[in-house]
Image (cartoon, rainbow, N blue to C red):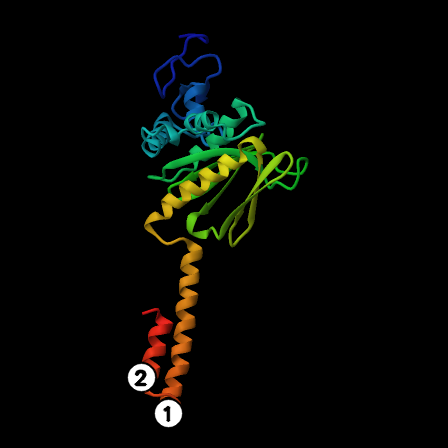
Amino acid sequence: MGFFKAECGVCNGEAGMTRLKLKKSKAWICSDCLKKAGGIMVVDVSKATVEDVQAILQEKAERIGDDPMSTAEGMYNYCKEHNFGKGFNEKQSLKHFTVLQDNLLKGEKVLMTYIGLNDFQSATKHDNNYAYAITSKRIIYGQKKVAGANFKAVEHGKINDISFETGVLFGTLKIDTPYEKIKVGLDKGSATHINNKIHEVLSELKGESMPVKETQQQVAATLSAADEIKKYKELLDMGAINQEEFDLKKKELLGL
């Protein structure tokens, strides 16, 4: 076919000028297929075959499905439509959301997304923009770097508290977990809306189960009541109170 006309062994389309060689298969791979598969960090062109790349793409397609919010483009468009993040450009934002897209679990649905300054301390002290998503399973956030990427996730059950405060230029979202406190700097104009949506989504998810704090409080209350009942049983056995007094106190402590 000559240098300027070559076919991609993965998609059978034109490979283009930026193609690379899959040496094991002695076939070309176009830049588009390589990017979709995860780039050269995932596809070792000296060892990977056409079948290897096709398997990666198939697995990704099955994981993402037809839900637009499972793609970097869909997550970014959600941010743009809802004005859930400022101070970033489209090209870089898509790179950050690609980190989230590539780390979605099978069956995990993205419910909302936003962009903010991670590890926010002040307007000049932070870890730059990250892409964030609330999914059906976790809060996930990531950042594409020049070499590699950062990705973190917190399961909903591990969230102790989410608080929010506004400043002169930014709103600060604080997510408290057993491991760390995640601080996100948000543009003041959209911060309140982002915070409200996060709580709305998490409340809907918790609709079928009791929130973490409420569960902990109920367990503590139950343990406390059990201790008190044990004390009154000892008083009953000692003869300090009668059976009727014990039964009344037991009902009171158990809220019956």
| Distance Cα–Cα, label 1 vs label 2 | 12 Å
Q: Residues within 10 Å of mark 2 (few under 14, many from 20)?
A: few
Q: Residues within 10 Å of mark 1 (few under 14, many from 20)?
A: few
- Residue 129 position within the rendered picture, expressed as x and y whole percent measured from the top left: 57, 33
State left or right for residue 222 relative to residue 178: left
Q: Earlier in the sequence, mark 1 or mark 2?
A: 1
Q: Nearer the viewer, residue 116 or 201?
A: 201
Q: Could you tell me which secondary element the residue under label 1 belongs to? A: loop
Furthest residue to the bottom? 239
**Amino acid marked by disc 1:** Gly
Compared to 125, does 51 lie above or below? above
Say the numbered circle drawn on residue 29: none
The residue that mark 1 highlights is 239
- Residue 116 position within the rendered picture, expressed as x and y whole percent measured from the top left: 55, 35
The quadrant in which the N terminus is found is top left
Q: Quadrant of residue 105?
A: top left
Q: Nearer the viewer, residue 204 or 118?
A: 204
Q: Residue at x 49, y 36 (%)?
A: 194
Say the numbered circle drawn on residue 244: 2
The quadrant in which the C terminus is found is bottom left
